[in-house]
């Protein structure tokens, strides 16, 4: 009884799941040429990928599309049939069926009063019929296979009254939220500006140290560990220049290595007219080797270094422009505690990064990144005189070249 009610409803919508019991003549038929969903990977934003396997192919068999003529009527009938091989249903995803004549002039479209009605039987087979005017030569039919996943197609039926062809193209307007950022690797080079203020003890004095160098080298790698988990690693090295510091000159290199996990959710998103946003949390650790100055006597000083590990927590946001030309990555971290490896280091720190990237191709990218660190706390080295209250501000600007995977 439920199936009969469905048939009657579709009939009053000018769509039937059974052929009318009238004299009919098949005028034309054509197999369906289906464009794979996987081919649309390059149509999404260059910095996004199909992390949820949304671009997989649905399990469906399409029969030939048929055009049927009824001598008693001045209309044609388009028959669409096939069989669903997985737990999906089929329906129209738009109310409008567009029609064009032989001269490609638009005809009055067919407007469906209801589009959410499932059209398959319990066996998975479906047979959909549309009444169209005799002079229609080109038809667009919006069909959706839906269930736990959604697959939208626009069917282009050309040459209704001559050699007919049928092309099914996937439509991505309802699945874009399932994409995530692509795996990427960066190498970069640039400059560092740093200011380091140390109030030393037991020899009490204040050291204001500044350094500006052009030898920063960096490496960053990011890959999707799970659908909602991303592993991020980065490393950079740069030199801190000490000039005429109590008869001490030279430079010492600092090193920084970060490793963290990014937690996100596919439903977290925001979009406006310019971009859409993916955001989430960060948790990880940071290893740093940093040079420090100390006062050895009233007229002499020295340079030491300290190695420590800090825990990091923070957040990030990724901006994907709708024109597919730009990608922006923003992150901010709090360093709430430190563990010194060869010195005592305590305090609180902040670090952050802002990068803007542009794709050169589907696999290559360039970007401009700025990132930095701020720290307020205490440092105690191995030498008894190497003690100080420390304030550090460090910033980098660099150009990067990247590989997208």
Image (tube, rainbow, N blue to C red):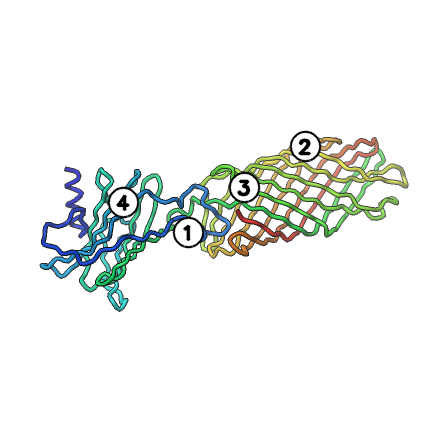
Instruction: Give the secondary structure at mark 2.
Output: strand
**Circle number at residue 338:** 2
The residue shown at (54%, 49%) is: 404
Relative vertical location of residue 196 with respect to residue 190 in this rendering, above or below: above
In the displayed structure, does residue 143 sit left or right of residue 244? left
Of pointers 1 and 4, the one earlier in the residue sequence: 1
In the rendered structure, are the residues bearing label 2 and label 1 in contact, judged by CB atoms less than 8 Å apart?
no
User: How far separated are the C-alphas under marks 2 and 1?
Assistant: 47 Å
Check disc 4: other Cα within 10 Å, few if <14, some if 14-19, many if 20+: many
User: How far separated are the C-alphas under marks 3 and 4?
Assistant: 36 Å
User: How far separated are the C-alphas under marks 1 and 4?
Assistant: 21 Å
- Along the line of sight, the residue nearer the viewer: 166 or 146: 166
**Circle number at residue 40:** 1
In the displayed structure, does residue 98 sit left or right of residue 331? left
- Along the line of sight, the residue nearer the viewer: 67 or 227: 67
In the rendering, at what x and y percent does residue 175 appear?
Answer: 39, 46
Instruction: Give the secondary structure at mark 3.
Output: strand
Residue that mark 3 sits on = 223
Q: Tell me the quarter of the image containing the N terminus.
A: top left
Check disc 2: other Cα within 10 Å, few if <14, some if 14-19, many if 20+: many
């Amino acid at each position: 009884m439920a199936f009969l009610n469905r048939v009657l409803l579709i009939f009053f919508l000018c769509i039937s799941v059974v052929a009318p019991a009238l004299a009919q003549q098949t005028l034309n038929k054509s197999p369906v040429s289906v464009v794979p969903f996987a081919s649309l990977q390059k149509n999404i934003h260059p910095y996004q990928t199909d992390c949820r396997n949304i671009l997989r192919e649905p399990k469906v068999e399409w029969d030939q599309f048929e055009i049927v003529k009824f001598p008693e009527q001045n209309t044609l009938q388009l028959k669409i049939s096939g069989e669903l091989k997985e737990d999906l249903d089929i329906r129209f995803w738009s109310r409008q069926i567009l029609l064009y004549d032989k001269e490609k002039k638009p005809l009055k479209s067919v407007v469906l009063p209801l589009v959410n009605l499932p059209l398959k039987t319990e066996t998975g087979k479906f047979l959909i019929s549309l009444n169209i005017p005799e002079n229609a030569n080109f038809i667009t039919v919006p069909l959706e296979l839906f269930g736990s996943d959604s697959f939208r197609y626009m069917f282009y039926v050309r040459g209704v009254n001559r050699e007919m062809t049928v092309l099914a193209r996937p439509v991505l307007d309802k699945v874009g939220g399932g994409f995530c950022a692509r795996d990427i690797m960066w190498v970069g080079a640039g400059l560092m500006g740093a200011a380091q203020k140390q109030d030393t003890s037991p020899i009490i004095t204040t050291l204001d140290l500044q350094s500006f160098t052009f030898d920063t080298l960096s490496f960053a790698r990011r890959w999707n560990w799970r659908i909602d988990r991303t592993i991020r690693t980065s490393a950079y090295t740069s030199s801190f220049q000490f000039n005429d510091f109590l008869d001490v000159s030279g430079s010492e290199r600092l090193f920084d290595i970060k490793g963290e996990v990014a937690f996100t959710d596919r439903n977290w998103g925001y979009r406006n007219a310019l971009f859409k946003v993916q955001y989430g949390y960060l948790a990880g650790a940071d290893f740093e080797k940093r040079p420090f100055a100390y006062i050895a006597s009233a007229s002499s000083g020295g340079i030491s270094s300290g190695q420590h590990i800090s825990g990091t927590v923070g957040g990030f946001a990724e901006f994907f422009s709708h024109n597919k030309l730009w990608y922006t990555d923003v992150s901010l971290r709090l360093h709430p505690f430190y563990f010194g490896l060869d010195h005592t280091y305590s305090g609180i720190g902040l670090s952050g990064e802002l990068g803007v990237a542009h794709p050169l191709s589907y696999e290559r990218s360039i970007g401009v990144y700025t990132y930095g660190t701020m720290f307020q706390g205490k440092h105690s080295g191995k030498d008894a005189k190497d003690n100080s209250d420390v304030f550090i501000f460090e910033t980098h600007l660099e150009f990067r070249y990247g590989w997208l995977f």
